[in-house]
Amino acid sequence: MNNTISIRVADFLRRFPPFNAIDKTDLENLAAEVSIVYRDKGSAVFQTDEAPHECFYVVHKGAVILNNKENNSLLDKCDEGDIFGLRPLIANENYKMDAFAFEESILYAIPLNAFRPHTQKYEDVGNFLIESFASNTRNPYSIKEKGQLVSGSVAPKITPTNTVLFDFQQVTYSKKIVSCTKTTTIQSLAERMTKRKVGAMLVLEDKLPIGIITDKDIRNKVATGLLPISAKASEIMTSPVITYPKKMTVAQAQMAMMKSNISHLCLTEDGTVNTAAAGILSKHDLMLTLGNNPAVLMKAIKRARKIKKIKLIRKSIMNLLQGYLDQNIPMTLTSRIISELNDACVKQVTNLSLERMSSPPPVKFSWISMGSQGRSEQLLHTDQDNALIFEDVEESELANTTKYFLKLAKHITKGLMKIGYEYCPAEMMGSNPKWCLSLSQWKTAVSHWIANPGPEEVLLSSIFFDYNLVYGEKELIDQLTEHIFEETSTYPIFFRHLASGALQNPSPSGFFRSFLVEDDGAHKDFFDLKRRALMPLVDAARLLILSHKIKSINNTAERFERLAELEPNSQELFLACSYATKALLKFRTKQGLLHNDSGRFIALDTLSKEEKIKLKRTFKTIKELQELIKVRFMVANLLG
């Protein structure tokens, strides 16, 4: 007689990934192992620091809230068909969050041991779990959640309880292999493992791995008396060896250990036992790799009590950036994550600077980043562009209030300099009285730029209009943004002047599509990637998005993607501009990391033919974009 309950469970599960990739018989067998869990509203499924259960959960009816206990913030809400509670089992660590029933709920508890074989048998099941961890969504195939985190926001937000893209990082493994033959005695190999301080030893034959012996094997088979210490390695080893290619990501390593329920992986050149061993990856190695992920770095930034500590963390951020570039992680995600970590550094410097002040701020204020950092495009160590806006005060209090915030701004800019952001040569920083103003003063300054758009005013507005709130009151920023749009509506001629400024950057190429290089100065014969290629795209995106009165999109690539939605007739061009922006930003970042500089000036003779071709492909897009701007805003021919 059929188990009608298990059949009902199977019928429910096959409606959702990854269970829909499992055939009917296997799914019904799995369903027979499932336990049904009932939870009243408000009752816990598991709590922070609780040891992991031997199962993970699927919501059948009701809803479950995942909550960060440290700051009592909502991380996610799991509804019908959503999976939760799996990561702690993979990471072999206690739960890092609370799970409570949001309402009366029925859950299916799926035993990990019963589920594990299906991750090996069905490739789609394993891929689903890897991709769900890597994308940080409950369902990586969900269009609604694609590219988003549990918060549902467009841009990734890094918290200590989510891991964003660290799953894409390649694992660090031990290349110093300790090995023996199958005739080596257990006593001898145990002594060697103790001397070399390793937890696993490979058994080799003709330099190829045929078995592996771990501390656990010695405890379970020798310490219990099952085998004497004089026995041979062949009697204790696990064989055949489960092997993987040496280039593994964190997510793949987690999945591999979970699938086979093992704590050590043998890595070979091609991932098979037919090539020599390249190293061993232990669960301890994996945990060390996890320690250099964005979530851990974010937590370290927030805990930093000294500027020197933040400077050290920034070095780790650069290592993370290099890893993302090496692994070809999408540039949009890379720039968001690195920018958010950089913003966190600035925010913590601001916190430490506030602690140095003799009194709290007299009124509310906002610290904003401008230029490339305001666009979330400042991946390398460049100079500062920032400003401070404070709440309006009575005229009698203005001088003292300004004095307070200038002192605070000097602490902040000095701290930023110490962690790697050089002072702005043009002094466009909050420590400059011209860039430390009340909201009304800022409105007056912006109105002047828009109503009197000379070359200097256009330059100032082009820098200032790419601003991003890093610390303080969002309301002040919103009011200033509203004022900018009101003023541009009053003075539409401003857009023509802004367009003229956007067209001042010279063409990237000359006759025969050759690169135009610098004629003189310190960078003679170098190609200025920023001025000739990136800035035309940045300036055009800013102009066009402002003309559409679109708020809260500062990133250049994202601006072009939004423009593609707003203007279907120019969709192909704008999407090409978005691609070109990301390609150029990635190229500049790679060059900067390679030469330990800003990546702005490129020595063309160091580029491969392929690299030159990729760069030139973006030039045609830039030319088409500038032609569109020239026609749309009726600008005289400035492209000669």
Image (tube, rainbow, N blue to C red):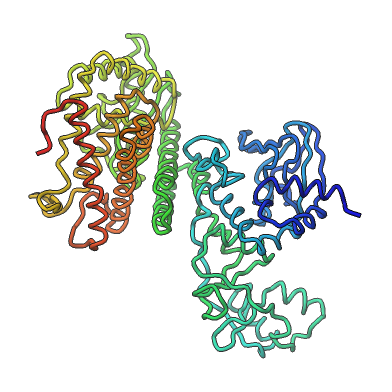
Residue drawn at (44%, 24%), measured in percent from left and top?
A: 474
Determine whether 51 is above or below 534 in the image.
Answer: below
Query: Could you say where residue 623 lies in the image, as x and y percent from the top left?
Result: 20, 41
For the question of whether residue 194 can be seen, the reply is: no
Q: Is residue 322 left or right of residue 67?
A: left
For residue 402, what is the image quadrant? top left
The one nearer the camera, 437 or 593, is 593
Residue that extends furthest to the bottom in the rendered view of this protein = 183
Please give left or right for residue 533 compared with residue 157 in the image. left
Location of the C terminus (image quadrant) = top left
Q: Quadrant of residue 537?
A: top left
Closest to the observer: 516 or 523? 516
> 85 or 432, which lies in front?
85
Residue 403 to residue 272: above or below: above
Depth check: give the residue in front, 465 or 153: 153
Side (left or right) of 633 relative to 547 = left
User: x, y percentage for residue 361?
Assistant: 43, 22
Residue at 31% in and 19% down: 484
- Residue at 79% of width from left, 52% of height from top? 31
x and y, in percent, of residue 40 in the image: 81, 33
- How many numbered discs sit on the rendered protein? 0
**Quadrant (top left/top right/bottom left/bottom right) for the N terminus:** bottom right
Q: Is residue 271 left or right of residue 468?
A: right
Which percent across, then down, holds residue 556? 33, 37
Q: Is residue 466 visible?
A: yes
Using the image, determine if residue 153 lies above or below residue 264: above
The structure residue drawn at horizontal position 43% and vertical position 53%, both measured from the top left corner, is 329
